[in-house]
């Protein structure tokens, strides 16, 4: 992961909030704090055949390394992503 990403706005569905909280013990607030308007986020693009293009972002939440999966959203303002998942590496 050599590039950096800027996330100006993060969309998170209710279903994703429930999934990351119950399965991965990561809260919506933790994800937002880790990626929204944070400079220099390390990431890599992944073009998954089933899920499409997504950014894989590595962050630290507490003392855990967490992989956050972000899908670019077509938005005129740019830098808008939808959260796919967040889980400990």
Image (cartoon, rainbow, N blue to C red):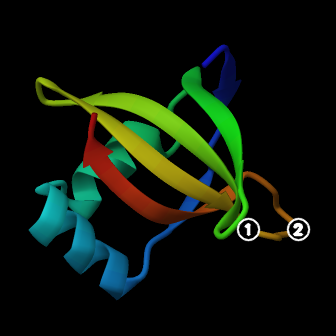
> Is residue 89 shown above or below 26?
above
Which secondary structure, mark 1?
loop
Left or right of 3? Residue 27 is left
Quadrant in which the N terminus appears: top right
Find the residue positioned furthest to the front.
49
Residue 45 percent location from the top left of the image: 71, 39
Q: Residues within 10 Å of mark 2 (few under 14, many from 20)?
A: few
For this rendering, which residue is in front, 81 or 38?
A: 81
The mark closer to the camera, 1 or 2, is 1
Residue 73 is tagged as 1
Q: Which mark is residue 76?
A: 2
**Separation of disc 1 and disc 2 at Cα?**
9 Å
Q: Quadrant of the C terminus?
A: top left
> Measuring 82% from the left and 70% from the top, which residue is drawn there?
74
Residue for point 51% across, 36% down: 57
Report whether 37 appears left or right of 6: left
State whether residue 30 is above or below residue 24. Answer: above
């Amino acid at each position: 992961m050599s590039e950096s990403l800027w996330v100006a706005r993060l969309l998170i569905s209710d279903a994703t909030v429930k999934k990351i909280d119950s399965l991965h013990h990561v809260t919506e607030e933790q994800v937002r704090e880790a990626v929204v308007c944070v400079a220099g986020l390390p990431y890599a693009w992944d073009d998954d055949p089933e899920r499409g293009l997504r950014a894989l972002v590595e962050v630290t939440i507490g003392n855990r390394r967490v992989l956050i999966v972000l899908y670019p959203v077509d938005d005129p303002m740019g830098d808008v992503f939808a959260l796919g998942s967040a889980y400990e590496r």
